[in-house]
Each structure stands twice: as structure tokens, then as C-alpha cells.
Amino acid sequence: MVLVFFIVILSHLAGMSHGQLKVGFYGKTCPNAETIVSTVVRQVAASDQNIAPVLLRLHFHDCFVQGCDGSILIENGAIGERHAFGHQGVSGFEVIERAKEEIERVCPGIVSCADIVALAARDAVVLANGPSYEVETGRRDGMISNLSLADNMPDVSDSIQILKAKFSQKGLSDKDLVVLSAAHTIGTTACFFMTQRLYDFSPGGGSDPSIDPSFLPELMTTCPRNGDVNVRLPIDRGSSGEFDKNILQNVRNGFAVLQSDASLYEDVETRSIVDSYFGILGPIFGISFEDDFANAMVKMGRIDVLTGLQGKIRRVCSRF
């Protein structure tokens, strides 16, 4: 009888160690988890209109370094991942901590910080009138946070070939690259990321020739040479407060703000994907930017996740 008991226990643990993400993972152990996260996000958004792109970017940056494991949240001094050059400007940590604190009061030690990041990103998209989608949960929190591990983050100055390679390494397709880049439909960027594109674009120097000539003076006025690099400008010209596909239309017309977004139209494959969202036959063939974005977010949320007995459940998201 004792032997049978241990066999059952070992079988159960083996199943846990190979656990999978699933929708409603906390349905029995912490049924109010998703509601708590969405409530916190809405409360923060009431006083901070920029929180939607902030939380969306936080999820992206977390997943692209060691997978979606909450490692970017750790504050362990100068070597911490959150201080990596590739994570410049990433924020929203206090929102995740606030949601975690409220969840811990009702479900201590149950919900991972990594899952809270994923849920908050979805809620942020919805707040910006973007598509809602079901978030798979069951992630565990990682045990490593080092800025050197973020060296290979996608960068605004990367060529389209490099961007495609970096996304492919994470199991993401060219379509995922296009629609996840289109998350720039909400939010702003700093002139710091524009200087090279406007004044020292290689080869040859000068400005990026892909910028529409009528748009260039507008960018240069906002971000003058030797000006304040912390000045911010909308990434999606004309529609920065609304989640829509307007940014892809800007890419087509030479009005992309970021070099990485503009590069989507330099490649045959990614250009055809961008164009597909504006073809008259798109609706007939079921082509939907919103659906593709939602699917890409779910797919990104699966990158190198820790489940089962892997990782830990942190009580405080910023500390191991």
C-alpha cells in the first residue's frame, strides 16, 4: 500500500515537471487572479494614459530574454537584467508589483510574476481598444537575471534580415515580426532612438532615404541635431493613442518613425504581409490584423516558459 502511494505521488510530480500552459490555469487555486490584474491595470490607466504601451513593451522584453519568466522584474543591482542597454526605457515594474501584492493577499504563493506580466499586457491592449484574447497561464518565475543575457534584443537599428533572424530564433514567423512590430501603434519613442536615422544614417550619412520628404522636416523639428534626446514623439503618426493598423499604412507610405518599422517594407516577405492587411480581398480570405496580433501575442507568450517544477513562484516580483 505504501509502495502504491509513492508511485502515485511520483507520477503526479512527473506530470507537474512537464506542465503546460493553459487558459484558466488558476481557475481553482486563485480564481480571482485575472480580475485582480485587470482591475489594477485599469486603475493605473485612469491616471497614466501611457501605461498600455508600457505594459505591452514590458511583456515583449521579458519574453525575448530567457523566455517569459519574469526575469526582467528582478532588481539585483547593476548586473540586473532590467539595466541592460537593450531594455532602455522599459518600465511598468511598479504596476506588476502592485498586482502581485493584491494577489498575494488572497492567494499567497500561487500566481507567478511572469503570468502577471502576460495578463497585464493583454489588459493593456484591450484598454487601447485592441483585440482581447485568452492568456495561457501556468508560467513559473526564472532564477537568473543578468544584463549580459539581453545582448541579443531586437534593436531599432537592426536590418530586416537581423530582425527576421532574431524572431526566428524565438520560434516566431515573419508574420509575427510584422504584427508584433505593429504594437508600436500605441506609445512614444525618444529622440535618442532617432538621431542616427535622421543625421547619420549609413551608408553615406545624412537621413534615411526611406523617410517621406514631407515627413522629414517634422521629425527633425521634434528631434533637432544635438537637441534633447529625451524628448518623446508618437511612434504611430496620426493615431498613436488608438490600437489599429494605421502604423502599417505609415510603413507603406514612408511615414514610419522607427527604422526597424520602416525596414518591414524593405523585404519581399514582410512587405507582402504588410500589404495583405490593406488588400480588398483581405476580408474575403479572413485576413485580420487584430486576429493575427492576438495569435502572435499568445505565441510569444510561450517562448521558453518554465512550468511544473521548473522555476519558482516569487512572493515579491523584484526579488529572488
Image: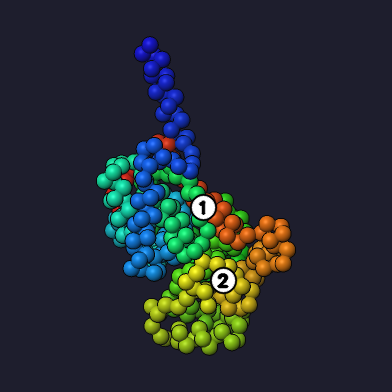
- Residue 30 is situated, as x and y percent measured from the top left of the image, at 36, 41
The residue lying at 69 percent from left, 62 percent from top is 282
The answer to whether residue 192 is left or right of residue 258 is left
Please tell me in which quadrant of the rendered image residue 203 appears.
bottom right
User: In the rendered image, which quarter contains the N terminus?
Assistant: top left
Q: Position of residue 108 (x, y in %)?
A: 29, 42
Q: For the residues marked 2 and 1, what is the alpha-carbon distance in whole angstroms? A: 21 Å
Up/down of 110 relative to 293, above or below: above
Q: Which mark, by number, is residue 81? A: none
Helix, strand or loop status at disc 1: loop
Residue 24 visible to the viewer = yes
* Residue positioned most to the left: 105
Mark 2 or 1: the one toward you: 1
Chosen colour scheme: rainbow
Up-down relation of residue 93 to residue 231 (above or below): above
Looking at numbered disc 1 in the image, what kind of residue is underneath it? Tyr
Residue corresponding to mark 2: 247
- Residue 40 % position (x, y): 34, 57
Which residue sits at x=41%, y=61%?
55
Question: Which residue is drawn at the image coordinates 47% and 71% (left, top)?
Answer: 241
Q: Residue at x 48, y 39 (%)?
A: 20
Q: Is residue 55 left or right of residue 176?
A: left
- Whether residue 293 sits left or right of residue 187 in the image: it is right
Mark 1 surroundings within 10 Å by alpha-carbon count, few (fewer than 14), some (14 through 19), many (20 or more): some
Task: Answer above or below: position of 32 versus 195.
Answer: above
Rendered image quadrant of residue 26: top left
Mark 1 lies on residue: 133
Q: Could one spot residue 203 in this view of the protein?
A: no
- Which element type, helix, strand or loop, lies under badge 2? helix
